[in-house]
Image (cartoon, rainbow, N blue to C red):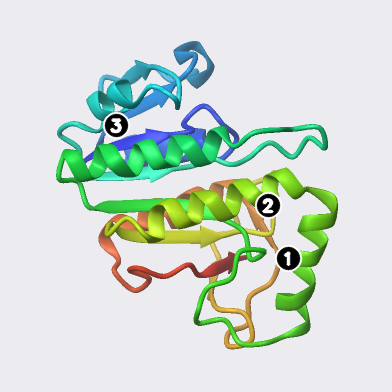
Amino acid sequence: MNVTVFGGSGQIGRFVVTDLLAAGHQVTAYVRNPAKLGIDDPGLTAVTGELSDAERIRQAVHGADAVISALGPSLKRGAKGTPITEGTRNIAAAMAAEDVSRYIGLATPSVPDERDQPTLKAKILPVMAKAMFPNALAELVGMTEAVTKSGLNWTIARITRPTNGKPKGTVRAGFLGRDKVGSAMTRPDIAAFLVAQLTDDTFSKAAPAISN
């Protein structure tokens, strides 16, 4: 497949790119600074641009079979604005214009899925997120709505506590109050889950919470 990756130079995005290349996919990585990718592979094309550049994003999406976004908001307390939300809207618009339907991205359980059941965790997480990271939560809500209301064939993996370290190779995926899903998950395992969704429709138009 030809896969366009956004956020490919980030902590999860790098694993997404390397996993895709290892699987034989052709990868277009849309990044601000290609040097931060640190990957030299004939299957990789880097496109330099900002998330605010709608035309440049469309160029990166052109010819893709799917898009994987490893973008996430800043967790800095003083962060302002919604650049990731606006960027995700540009991505969704570019995909629609280029007739690319498959979108795979990230969010957190602080943004509910309609399949979640009422639980204490489901109630507490949004309250904590709003108190501790109000701008980040606004970004996550905006990002999610930009995709779920777009008409794309989307899957959004909701992560709670990404960790460093070697992959464990175990995945729990499901919905709050319905399935046994924990909190921690290694970044390599998160990336592997995202890549696996290219050929798995189990969570089409759904936002499962995932963990190890």
Q: Residue 126 shows which numbered tag?
A: 1
What crowding class fits label 2: few (fewer than 14 Cα within 10 Å), some (14-19), or many (20 or more)? many
Image quadrant occupied by the N terminus: top left
Does dot 1 land on a helix, a strand or a loop? helix
Above or below, comparing residue 137 to residue 172 in the picture: above
What residue sits right under mark 3 in the picture?
Answer: 27
- Which corner quadrant of the image does residue 148 belong to? bottom left
Other residues around mark 1 within 10 Å, as few (<14) / some (14–19) / many (≥20): some
Residue bearing mark 2: 137
- x, y percentage for residue 8? 46, 31
Which residue does the image show at 48% across and 21% down from the upper left?
37
Does 76 appear above or below 52? below
Do labels 1 and 2 touch, CB within 8 Å?
A: yes
- Of pointers 1 and 2, the one earlier in the residue sequence: 1
> What is the x, y in percent for residue 149?
37, 60
Decide which of tag 2 and tag 3 comes sooner along the chain.
Answer: 3
Q: Residue drawn 50% across and 79% down?
A: 114
The amino acid type found where label 2 is placed reads: Leu
Tell me the element at label 3.
Answer: strand
- Provide residue 25's location: percent of width, then percent of height: 25, 38
Q: Is residue 130 left or right of residue 48?
A: right
